[in-house]
Image (cartoon, rainbow, N blue to C red):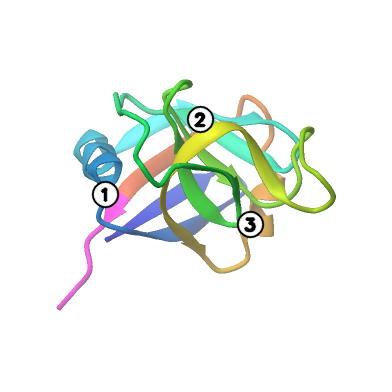
């Protein structure tokens, strides 16, 4: 399963794993939201209600596609946040891990607070 995340300055695709939260995210697409940044993380609200899954984590690899349950938001870390230790990607709370961005996640640096972000399901040809 793949999604495209786009904004005025670029786009990136992500490959998602089959999880309960992923299913809810896909049901909500296509969506438009407003970007927020926190250190080297971009996050934006989606109309999804989810529960923290058993494998939720607070520290993830750059480019991990996460869902922040308490904030109702897709979270895309690409580097350290204000609470990181050294160069890790540490999110504000444990998040559900949905998948991985394809390509260099540092393209997210071009997103600014308040930018419009679009998320859509990418239908793969057989």
Question: Upstream in the sequence, badge 1 or badge 2?
Answer: 1
Residue at horizontal 61 percent and vertical 38 percent from the top:
42
Q: Residue furthest left?
A: 126
Mark found first going from the N terminus, 3 or 2: 2
Residue picked out by circle 3: 62
Which residue position is annotated with label 1? 19
Asked if residue 23 is positioned above or below residue 52 in the image, the reply reads below
What secondary structure is marked by label 3? loop
Looking at the image, which residue is at 85% across and 50% down?
Answer: 86
Q: In what element is the residue under mark 2? A: strand
On the image, the x and y values in percent for residue 64 come to: 53, 54
Determine crowd level at label 1: few under 14, some 14-19, many 20+ residues with C-alpha closer than 10 A: some
Contact between marks 1 and 2 (CB within 8 A): the answer is: no
Q: Nearer the viewer, residue 58 or 25?
A: 58
In percent of the image, x 62 and y 59: which residue is there?
105
- The image position of residue 107, as x and y in percent, is 66, 56
Disc 3 to disc 2: CB gap under 8 Å: no
In primary-sequence order, the first of circles 3 and 1 is 1
Residue in view at x 23 percent, y 37 percent: 24
* Cα–Cα gap, marks 1 and 2: 20 Å
As for residue 111 lying within the magenta part, the answer is no
Give the labeled residue for mark 2: 44
Q: Quadrant of the C terminus?
A: bottom left
Bounds of the magenta segment: 121-126
In front: mark 3 or mark 1? 1
Element marked by disc 1: loop
């Amino acid at each position: 399963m793949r999604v495209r995340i786009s904004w005025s300055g670029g786009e990136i695709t992500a490959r998602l794993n089959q999880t309960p939260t992923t299913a809810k995210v896909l049901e909500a697409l296509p969506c438009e939201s407003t970007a927020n940044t926190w250190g080297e993380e971009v996050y934006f609200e989606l109309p999804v209600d989810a529960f923290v899954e058993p494998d939720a984590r607070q520290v993830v690899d750059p480019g991990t596609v996460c869902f922040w349950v308490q904030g109702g938001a897709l979270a895309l870390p690409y580097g350290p946040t204000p609470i990181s230790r050294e160069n890790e990607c540490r999110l504000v709370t444990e998040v559900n891990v949905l998948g991985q961005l394809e390509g260099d996640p540092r393209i997210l640096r071009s997103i600014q607070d308040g930018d419009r972000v679009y998320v859509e399901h990418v239908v793969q040809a057989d």
